[in-house]
Image: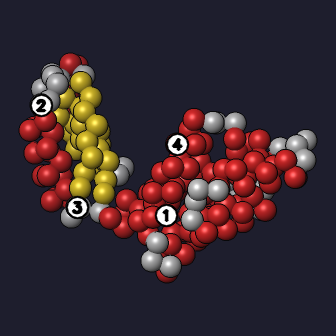
């Protein structure tokens, strides 16, 4: 059975994460993962190029060596393994899965907060702190979104949870109760 890109990303990320913890390189490997993310975002054809069968293995190896020269030995070996198993096209999935594991370990979550008007920094910080405390997290990074259609209040979306405290949601609930 062939694994999908998401499953490949999960497996490789878990292996790298466990190895980084074991070798006590947790933070430095995270920094290198972020550098890799930048490289792959800036060069979206890099992964497919490194798995392209029309390119000679020697040329791909030279490209990989150039790509990994500034990384730690552990990361170089990991990327060599990913390359040897012809999984470089899945690197964005591996990177994303590693970031998820890192965030979970550090107690970091991301949230989208929708409001009818722009929120100031103090309001965003208060929402972040309140949600972090409620969920037992160390940090919540908020992405503010303005949507006048919610009329007032906020809608917070994070980790597959939606907390809808908007006026529109309240009015919709009242309307459905009245129509029963």
The answer to whether the residue labelled 4 contacts the one labelled 1, judged by CB atoms less than 8 Å apart, is no
Comparing 172 with 177, the one in front is: 172
Residue at x 15% of width, y 39% of height: 124
Q: CA distance from mark 4 to mark 1?
A: 14 Å
Graded by Cα atoms within 10 Å as few (under 14), some (14 to 19) or many (20 or more), the crowding at tag 3 reads some
How far apart are the two marked residues, 3 and 4, measured between alpha carbons? 25 Å
CB contact under 8 Å: marks 1 and 3: no
Decide: marks 2, 4 in contact (CB < 8 A)?
Answer: no
Measured as percent of width and height from the top left, residue 47 is found at 70, 45
The residue shown at (77%, 62%) is 85
Alpha carbon distance from label 2 to label 3 = 21 Å
User: Which label is found at residue 120?
Assistant: 2
Q: Quadrant of residue 123?
A: top left
For marks 3 and 4, the one nearer the N-term is: 4
The residue where tag 4 is placed is 38
User: What residue is shown with label 3?
Assistant: 138
Q: CB of mark 3 within 8 Å of CB of mark 4?
A: no
Q: Could you tell which of marks 2 and 1 lies nearer the N-terminus?
A: 1
Q: Against 67, is 149 above or below?
A: above
In the rendered image, residue 134, in percent from the top left (x then y), is placed at: 16, 58
The span from disc 2 to disc 1 (Cα, nearest Å) is 34 Å
Please name the residue that numbered disc 1 is placed on.
29
The first of marks 4 and 1 along the sequence is 1
């Amino acid at each position: 059975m062939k694994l999908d890109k998401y499953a490949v990303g999960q497996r490789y990320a878990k292996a790298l994460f466990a190895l980084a913890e074991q070798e006590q390189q947790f933070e430095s490997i995270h920094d290198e993962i972020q550098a890799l993310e930048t490289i792959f975002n800036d060069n979206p054809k890099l992964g497919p190029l490194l798995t392209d069968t029309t390119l000679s293995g020697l040329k791909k190896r030279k490209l990989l060596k150039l790509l990994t020269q500034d990384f730690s030995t552990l990361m170089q070996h990991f990327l060599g393994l990913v390359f040897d198993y012809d999984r470089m096209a899945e690197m964005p999935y591996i990177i994303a899965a590693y970031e998820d594991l890192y965030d979970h370990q550090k107690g970091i979550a991301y949230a989208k907060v929708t409001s009818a008007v722009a929120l100031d920094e103090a309001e965003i910080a208060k929402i972040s702190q309140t949600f972090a405390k409620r969920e037992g997290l160390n940090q919540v990074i908020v992405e503010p979104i303005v949507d006048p259609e919610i009329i007032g209040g906020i809608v917070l979306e994070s980790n597959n949870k939606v907390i809808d405290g908007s006026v529109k949601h309240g009015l919709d609930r009242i309307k459905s109760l009245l129509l029963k």
